Amino acid sequence: MDWGSWKLHPGGLRVTVVQPAAEDVGASRARATAVAVQCSSLRQTWRVDGAWQAWAVPEPRSVGQQIVLDLCDEVQASPEGAIPPPAPAPGV
């Protein structure tokens, strides 16, 4: 993945649109429309069916972990433009 043009917002947060494949992330997350990564904690959350899942550390050697590692390794710090973290899904 080429994350070179992305910038890291204060707090270590990035959000992007995704189109994951079921064979890469499982049937539930294949319906995701976005993924958020918090580099300070190496956690991520997926937006599935219009709701953000709970923040979690991705499984070792998974596509989710590769997204976190690639993104947090390649982004440049940005002094402005903080994005608040996604709110957890209701009931989570």
Image: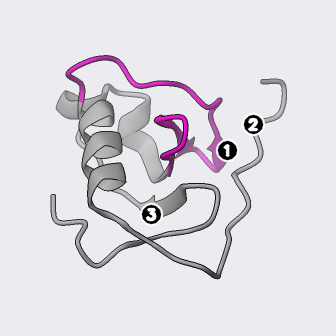
Q: Main secondary structure of the magenta part?
A: loop
Is residue 79 at least partly visible in the picture? yes
Residue type beneath disc 1: Ala
Do labels 2 and 3 touch, CB within 8 Å?
Answer: no
Locate residue 89, reporting x and y percent.
75, 36
Q: Nearer the viewer, residue 60 or 25?
A: 60
Q: State whether residue 68 is above or below residue 22.
A: below
Locate residue 3, reporting x and y percent.
25, 66
Give the mark, 2 or 3, whose residue is nearer the N terminus.
Answer: 3
Q: Which residues are magenta?
A: 37-62
Tell me the element at label 1.
strand
For label 3, the residue is 16
Find residue 55 and report its image quarter.
top right
Mark pair 2, 3: CA separation? 18 Å
For label 2, the residue is 89
Do labels 1 and 2 touch, CB within 8 Å?
Answer: yes
